[in-house]
Image: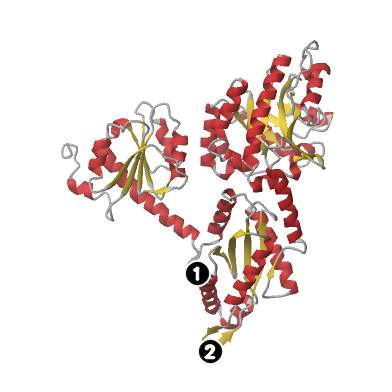
């Protein structure tokens, strides 16, 4: 059969010139009929596994993953699952012969070669494998060059930012955090000026080697650029631990350095920022560490500096808040308030948005802005948002039955929850248990979250759409989304950030941004919801430029279920869409 197809044993052996490949065939159910040609192509490979994704938590390493997409499966979701479960692999995807359009989309999202089912013979598989392997090798080398500092061989600033972002996303959410440290060589410019650029480069190489040699197990080192380095220190019991560790490290690497006839005494200063107490994003942590370094060097060189006096006390207060939040859900201390959204064309109620509140003992009703960052950092946000989804869906079902109106429920989803693999299943369960139909639940994600990982966002939105939820891009206009990606997101609406709405009357740049968002959204057949509407003048301006829906204190602030329900039943008017007056108030509570 091989000779008839023009595939010889020599060609098969030339699939890989290196050691034997480790190969995984991913398929659901029975192995595909073309497994025999695939085994023939990879005849020299002894490590060949077949089966579904096991989802063991830790990524497995394979040289080549062949993934079969069958009819009815979501191709992007399956590809994302493969990329999440396996590492360092070339990907060959096979798609149904009757739907070749999947091939183009999978190539755009990380597959190295794609075959339709009718091409899965020995010749086609050989061609795909021989194309995919060197393409993956080239990607690995390009990625290495992109992430490595050429002078010192350390990870560069881009690699460090990615590493810190990963640490934030996968932190253990307990009491332990980590420290981000910026190191700066004091008087480095003077050394360059006196001894020349070559001496400066040699010093940076020497310092990089000293940092690597002197670091403790929980310390990662990278080069920021110029005369600065980064450290990430994991597993800290308290913020003060970082300052002590960095102090020891500075003392170790600052010993005299000999260059030619010169013996130089090194002085290195450091600025420290603590996650999560002084920031939950890389940029914020860098800002704090840079500020600590800048102001600390004014006081004393060659030392490790924190942002400002009282940092440890603030950290202790954050830990106390995290402790109180840890059991708040179990103690039933969270409640939901709801704010109405109105259709500016029909004056009818279009939906409500759920807002989280905390009935903290001894503090009264606490708004989410005061505790949500700590809740996210402590690891409780996903569990709370699951509760929000189920509670909001039950409330909407009760209000729909009470009023006879088919308005929507909007629920905010955090970045961590949006990335949670269980989110589609959670949404599906919330919709099924409440009996809500497709389209009744809107999930709001910020523009920044949507653009953080475009491939993952596209696949996740596809999964949410499949279970009956719609997705809305919140705070639109404040991030950096691309039109080409916005067109590909299967979203239902965008929300204009309140800062642009507030500038409408002043004729500032916000007015132009708002008009642009409305025009773009109408071209893409998307609803546009303006938030933070405070006056009748803003309502008229929004209606004039084509905005379809709005919410804000002009229509009503977020209120408890009973308060809003009373208005739904009794405060009828043009804006309430003629709800029935004869229904008795009913509530499921907050």
Residue 311: give x, y in percent of width and height.
74, 60
Does residue 194 sit above or below 207 in this rendering? below
How did the renderer colour the structure? secondary structure
Residue 48: give x, y in percent of width and height.
30, 44
Picture quadrant of residue 97: top left
Q: CA distance from mark 1 to mark 2?
A: 23 Å
Does residue 9 sit above or below 350 in this rendering? below
Camera-nearest residue between 537 and 323: 323
Residue 371: give x, y in percent of width and height.
73, 44
Mark linked to residue 152 = 1
What is the secondary structure assignment of the residue under circle 2?
A: loop
Residue shown at the point (53%, 89%) measured from the top left:
261
Q: Are marks 1 and 2 in contact (CB under 8 Å)?
A: no
Q: Between disc 1 and disc 2, whose residue precedes?
A: 1
Query: In the rendered image, is residue 481 in sight?
Result: no
Query: In the rendered image, is residue 251 in sight?
Result: yes
Residue 417: give x, y in percent of width and height.
60, 39
Instruction: Give the quadrant of the C terminus.
Output: top right
Q: Which residue is at the far front?
A: 331
Q: Which residue is at the far top?
A: 582
Residue shown at the point (63%, 69%) measured from the top left:
246
Camera-nearest residue between 460 and 357: 357
Crowd around label 1: few <14 · some 14–19 · many ≥20 (10 Å): some
Does residue 502 sit above or below 561 in this rendering? below
User: What residue does disc 2 label?
Assistant: 261
Instruction: Give the quadrant of the N terminus.
Output: top left
Crowd around label 2: few <14 · some 14–19 · many ≥20 (10 Å): few
What is the secondary structure assignment of the residue under circle 1?
A: loop
Picture quadrant of residue 143: bottom left
Residue shown at the point (47%, 40%) measured from the top left:
80
């Amino acid at each position: 059969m091989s000779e008839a197809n023009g595939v010889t044993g020599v060609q098969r052996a030339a699939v890989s010139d290196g050691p034997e490949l480790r190969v995984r065939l991913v398929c659901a159910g029975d192995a595909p009929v073309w497994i025999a040609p695939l085994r023939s192509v990879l005849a020299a490979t002894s490590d060949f596994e077949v089966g579904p994704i096991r989802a063991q938590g830790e990524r497995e390493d394979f040289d080549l993953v062949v993934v079969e997409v069958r009819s009815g499966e979501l191709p992007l979701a399956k590809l994302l699952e493969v990329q999440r479960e396996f590492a360092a692999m070339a990907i060959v995807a096979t798609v149904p012969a009757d739907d070749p359009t999947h091939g183009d989309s999978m190539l755009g999202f990380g597959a190295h070669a794609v075959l339709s089912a009718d091409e899965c013979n020995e010749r086609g598989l050989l061609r795909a494998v021989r194309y995919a392997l060197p393409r993956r090798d080239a990607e690995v080398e390009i990625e290495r060059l992109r992430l490595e500092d050429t002078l010192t061989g350390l990870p560069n600033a881009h690699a460090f930012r990615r590493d810190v972002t990963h640490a934030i996303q996968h932190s253990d959410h307990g009491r332990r955090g980590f420290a981000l440290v910026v190191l700066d060589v004091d008087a480095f410019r003077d050394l360059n000026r006196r001894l020349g650029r070559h001496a400066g480069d040699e010093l940076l190489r020497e310092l990089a080697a000293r940092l690597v040699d002197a670091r403790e197990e929980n310390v990662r080192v990278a080069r920021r650029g110029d005369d600065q380095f980064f450290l990430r220190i994991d597993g800290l019991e308290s913020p003060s631990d970082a300052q002590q560790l960095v102090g020891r490290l500075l003392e170790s690497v600052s010993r005299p350095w000999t260059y030619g006839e010169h013996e130089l005494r090194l002085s290195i200063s450091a600025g420290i920022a603590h996650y999560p107490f002084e920031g939950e994003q890389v940029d914020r942590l860098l800002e704090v560490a840079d500020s600590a370094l800048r102001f600390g060097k004014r006081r004393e060189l060659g030392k490790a500096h924190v942002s400002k006096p009282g940092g440890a006390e603030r950290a202790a207060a954050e830990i106390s808040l995290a402790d109180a939040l840890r059991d708040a859900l179990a103690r039933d201390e969270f409640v939901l308030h709801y704010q109405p959204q109105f259709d500016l064309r029909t004056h009818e109620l279009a939906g409500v948005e759920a807002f989280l509140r905390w009935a903290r003992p001894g503090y009264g009703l606490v708004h989410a802005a005061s505790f949500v960052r700590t809740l996210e950092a402590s690891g409780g946000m996903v569990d709370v948002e699951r509760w929000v989804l189920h509670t909001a869906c039950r409330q909407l079902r009760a209000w729909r039955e009470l009023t006879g109106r088919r308005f929507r429920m909007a629920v905010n989803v955090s970045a961590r929850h949006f990335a949670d693999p269980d989110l589609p299943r959670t949404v599906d369960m919330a919709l099924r248990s409440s009996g809500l139909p497709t389209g009744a639940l809107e999930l709001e994600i910020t523009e920044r979250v949507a653009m953080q990982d475009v491939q993952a966002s596209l696949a996740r939105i596809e999964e949410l759409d499949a279970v009956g939820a719609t997705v809305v891009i919140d705070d639109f206009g404040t991030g950096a989304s691309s039109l080409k990606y916005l067109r590909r997101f299967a979203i239902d609406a965008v929300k204009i950030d309140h800062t642009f709405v507030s500038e409408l009357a002043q004729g500032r740049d916000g007015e132009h941004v708002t008009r642009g968002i409305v025009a773009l959204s109408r071209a893409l057949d998307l609803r546009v919801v303006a938030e933070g509407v405070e006056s009748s003048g803003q309502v008229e301006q929004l209606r004039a430029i084509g905005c379809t829906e709005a919410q804000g204190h002009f229509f009503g602030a977020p209120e408890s279920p009973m308060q809003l329900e009373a208005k739904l039943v009794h405060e009828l008017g043009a804006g309430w869409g003629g709800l029935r007056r004869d229904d008795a108030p009913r509530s499921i509570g907050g």
